[in-house]
Image (spheres, helix red, strand yellow):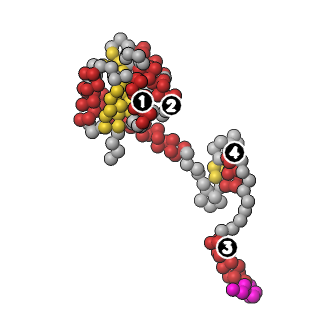
Amino acid sequence: MEQHSILIVDDEPIVRHTLQQDLLDQGYLVDSAEGGEIALQKLAKKEYSLIITDLIMGEMNGLDLLDAIKQKRPEQAVFILTGYGRLESAIAALRLGATDYLLKPYDYDEMILRVGRCLAMQKMEKTLKMYENLLSICSECKKIRDDSSTTKEKGENWISIEKYLSKTTGSDLSHGICPECYKKKIKELDLFMKKTNQPTRKE
């Protein structure tokens, strides 16, 4: 089972400690940082499944931290903690790419539920991205589906491997034959010669 790592960013020690203990109890790996700058330093050295950050902090607030994170790692999941009366800031965070937000003081069960949901969403997005990067190859003719093509009718977006590589790499391919295919072709030729009563190739 995958063990997720979480980074807590909050300038209040009591909040960091309480949240860290709650998440550790759920089996997560947890680090903490008392501000945005320290959080960015940790992010430069380690990847986290989720970042939970307060909005109102000292030198770097939560929105600035979120913006800095998204510029470097657009796919990073970020969870916002905010006090009552700060809903406008929470909405602004969502517009900047935050995955979710929670009002504090938080309810333990709701926090665990939302953290789990954020991690599940991130896993689903990674899976979708992985499938988007896979090439579809016809099992019969070995053509590749070129989804970048603007013409989708009559199978015109299925192109040969040679054409696809030429299009994506800008290189022209030269044709040859590998030793295994050469031997296979020779055997096929010998079989054809025998069937047609023609002299076979001398070894």
**Could you tell which of marks 4 and 3 lies nearer the N-terminus?**
4
**Could you tell which of marks 1 and 4 lies nearer the N-terminus?**
1
Depth-wise, is mark 2 or mark 4 nearer the camera?
2
Q: What's drawn in magenta, residue-wise?
A: 195-203
Determine the CA span between mark 2 and mark 4. 38 Å
Judge whether 106 appears above or below 48 on screen. Answer: above
The residue to which callout 3 is attached is: 182
- Name the residue type under label 4: Glu
**53 with respect to 181 (left or right):** left
The residue to which callout 2 is attached is: 72
Under circle 4, the secondary element is helix
The residue to which callout 4 is attached is: 153
Judge whether 150 appears above or below 202 on screen. Answer: above
Judge whether 198 appears above or below 45 on screen. Answer: below
Under circle 1, the secondary element is helix
Q: Residues within 10 Å of mark 3 (few under 14, many from 20)?
A: few
Residue 55 appears in the figure: yes
- Name the residue type under label 2: Lys
